[in-house]
Image: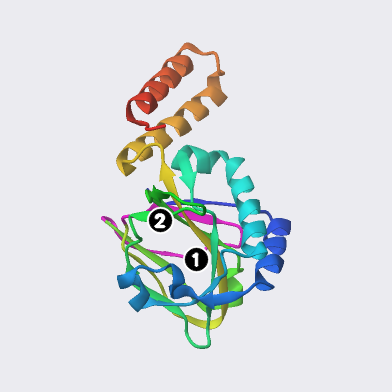
Amino acid sequence: MLLAIPSVLDAAQVARARAVVEGGEWRDGRVTAGVQSALAKHNLQLANDGDSAREAGEMILSALAGNGLFQSAALPRRIVPPLFNRYDAEPGHKFGEHVDNALRPLPGGGRIRTDLSATLFLSDPADYDGGELVIEDSYGSHSVKLDAGDLILYPSTSLHRVEPVTRGSRLASFFWIESMVREDSQRTLLLDMDAAVRTLAGEVGDDHRAVVALTGTYQNLLRRWADA
């Protein structure tokens, strides 16, 4: 599943998030990279133990909790608190091809399995050149550069990279999700069924027999596949 989710943050929230994180402490981005990823990672990352990352991250988590498409697609069990990175044209920041670590630590202890990766764009695409997130899957390469406030959701098993920024700066949030449904193919089927049920309900009503039956099938599949 490769899914763009528009307007996770509205314009006012984007402006607030940018103001908060731009005034924070930025460090070498390799601090969160694995051994292999560190060789390819060249960017800056906001200190994740500071007030700036905490405030902006809580804003994003609150927005995600109220976003129906994200909830339906990700079926989140746990989310790593959002992190923030910056790619500058000088010195040509980029992130070479890599696959995200299978496990990520959580603040305060414990760890999650990374089923899904997410990037929430905070810079307007007109403000920088390059910086595309390129994701590889069985259908080829997908180049992603979304409007500020939009989010891209994709399997953490995907090979991906960030192209060099050649003008301006690219500011974004990134994080990982452990889903209640581990398998990407099963999450995709559930998302498609949920969308179809919602469309049908809008045409014939929530209490129509077909809507009730399909909703029951959705819930039974979720019951079979979910690890709550």
| Numbered disc total | 2
Identify the magenta region.
Answer: 138-157
**Is residue 114 toward the left or the right of residue 44 in the image?**
left
Q: Amino acid type of disc 2?
A: Arg
Height in image: 216 above or below 139?
Answer: above
Name the spot of residue 221 as percent of width and height, x first.
Answer: 35, 25
| Colour pattern of the rendering | rainbow
Residue furthest to the top: 209
The answer to whether any part of residue 27 appears in the image is: yes
The answer to whether any part of residue 8 appears in the image is: no
Name the spot of residue 32 as percent of width and height, x first.
Answer: 44, 67
Whether the magenta-drawn stretch holds residue 123 is answered as no
Q: Which of marks 1 and 2 is in front?
A: 2
Question: Nearest the camera: 145 or 52?
Answer: 52
Looking at the rendered structure, the secondary structure element under dot 2 is strand
Residue furthest to the front: 109
Q: Name the residue under label 2.
A: 104
Q: Residue at x 48, y 57 (%)?
A: 175
Structural distance between the alpha carbons of marks 1 and 2: 25 Å
The disc label shown at residue 145, or none: 1
Height in image: 166 above or below 32?
Answer: below
Question: Nearest the camera: 53 or 9?
Answer: 53
Name the spot of residue 215 as percent of width and height, x first.
Answer: 45, 21
Whether the magenta-drawn stretch holds residue 149 is answered as yes
**Is residue 21 toward the left or the right of residue 79 in the image?**
right
- Labels 1 and 2 touching (C-beta < 8 A): no
Q: Residue at x 51, y 39 (%)?
A: 71
Q: Amino acid type of disc 1?
A: Lys
